[in-house]
Image: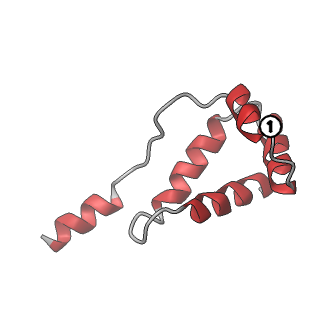
Amino acid sequence: MRELVRYLLENAYIDFGGDLSMEKVRELLRDDDTREARSLLAKLIDDKGVDDLMITIADCLKDHIRVGITEDTIREQLSTYSES
């Protein structure tokens, strides 16, 4: 049983429901004037969309499945992504 659990954890993947677009990101960040929000938006503009963000965040969050994914975890990953 332990090996099966380990296998399932190692092969789990994260998928986000809904359609995230640049317009939706702008809408969600509209009232957020923080440096982090501006940096993330600039990175997404450089990347010409949110596709790389979604793939990168899902991949990075996979490492946190065992301990739990929290709002702080996602915030940290978004910050790391925007600084890359």
Q: What residue is rendered at 58% in x and 51% in y?
A: 57
Task: Decide if residue 7 is on the left or right side of residue 60.
Answer: left
- For the N terminus, the image quarter is bottom left
Task: Decide if residue 49 is on the left or right side of residue 67.
Answer: right
Count of marks, rendered view: 1
Q: Secondary structure at mark 1?
A: loop
Q: Compared with residue 6, is residue 50 higher up or lower down, i.e. above or below?
A: above
Q: What residue is rendered at 34% in x and 62% in y?
A: 10
Q: Where is residue 61 drawn, in percent x and y? A: 51, 58
Q: What residue is rendered at 22% in x and 66% in y?
A: 5
Task: Decide if residue 27 is on the left or right side of residue 3.
Answer: right
Q: Compared with residue 54, is residue 71 higher up or lower down, i.e. above or below?
A: below
Q: Where is residue 50 drawn, in percent x and y? A: 67, 35
- Depth order, front residue of 42/56: 42
Q: Where is residue 40 drawn, in percent x and y? A: 78, 47
- For the C terminus, the image quarter is bottom right
Q: What residue is rendered at 57% in x and 60% in y?
A: 71
Q: Where is residue 47 drawn, in percent x and y? A: 77, 37
Q: Compared with residue 21, is residue 7 higher up or lower down, i.e. above or below?
A: below
- Residue identifier under label 1: 30
- Depth order, front residue of 55/37: 37
In the picture, residue 60 is in which quadrant? bottom right
| Residue type highlighted by circle 1 | Arg
In the picture, residue 35 is in which quadrant? bottom right
In the picture, residue 8 is in which quadrant? bottom left
